[in-house]
Image (cartoon, rainbow, N blue to C red):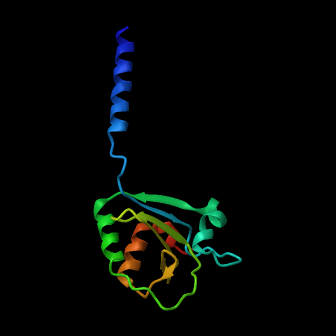
Amino acid sequence: MLRSLYIILGFVLLLDYCYGQKKNERSISISSVNFYTTTYRSISCDKFEPLLGAMITTNVVCAKDSIRELEDLLSHIKYSNNSHSIDARAKINFINESGERVIICMNLSDVCVNGRLIEEYPVFMEFLRSLIPKKQLAVR
């Protein structure tokens, strides 16, 4: 009887803990494949998951300083007049402070934000690479 009471109490505490968590925590979701992966055709941002699904590794970053850094860097991007699409090797999903979804796709040399190529921005590229697992940036 006492054992059952402890089990029920433990379950209630677990439920309280799970449902007591903030549901609206912001995060950065990074899906990537090895950047040196060769494909028979260019992989656009919108085809990234369907075409590379089995090879994708996904990581989630919840660190508030990383989220703030991404917000700050995004506020300083300049879009390129060049409109070529990139051969994506990473896709980053992020909800900005305004609640809008931001999709960033990148390869070794180019970055697109919401489908638009940005001008060279080395600090931004370095930050994005820091979010990607090192094994995805290594030559195989």
Lateral position of residue 132 relative to residue 63, left or right: right
Please state the horizontal and vertical placement of residue 55, each as a whole percent of the image. 61, 62
In the image, what residue occupies the spot 46% across and 59% down? 59
Outermost bottom residue: 81
In the image, taking residue 133 as reference, residue 87 lies left or right, namely: right
Q: Residue at x 38, y 8 (%)?
A: 1
Please, which residue is most extreme toward the top here? 1
The answer to whether residue 52 is above or below residue 126 is above
Q: Quadrant of residue 51?
A: bottom right
- Count of labels shown? 0
Whole-percent x, y for residue 131 in the image: 41, 67
Q: Is residue 63 above or below residue 76?
A: above
Q: Identify which residue is drawn at 36% across, 37% down.
A: 19
In the picture as drawn, the residue positioned furthest to the right comes out as: 40
Image coordinates for residue 23, horizontal then vertical, percent: 37, 47
Which corner quadrant holds the C terminus? bottom right
Question: Looking at the image, is 60 positioned above or below residue 88?
Answer: above
Q: Position of residue 139 (x, y in %)?
A: 55, 75
Residue sitting at x 48%, y 74%: 114
Which residue is nearer to you in this view: 64 or 23?
Answer: 23
Q: Quadrant of residue 52?
A: bottom right
Does 41 sit left or right of 129 as displayed? right
Of the pair 116 and 8, the residue shown nearer to us: 116
| Residue placed most toward the observer, 47 or 88 | 47
Q: Is residue 10 above or below residue 104?
A: above
Q: Is residue 5 left or right of residue 109?
A: left
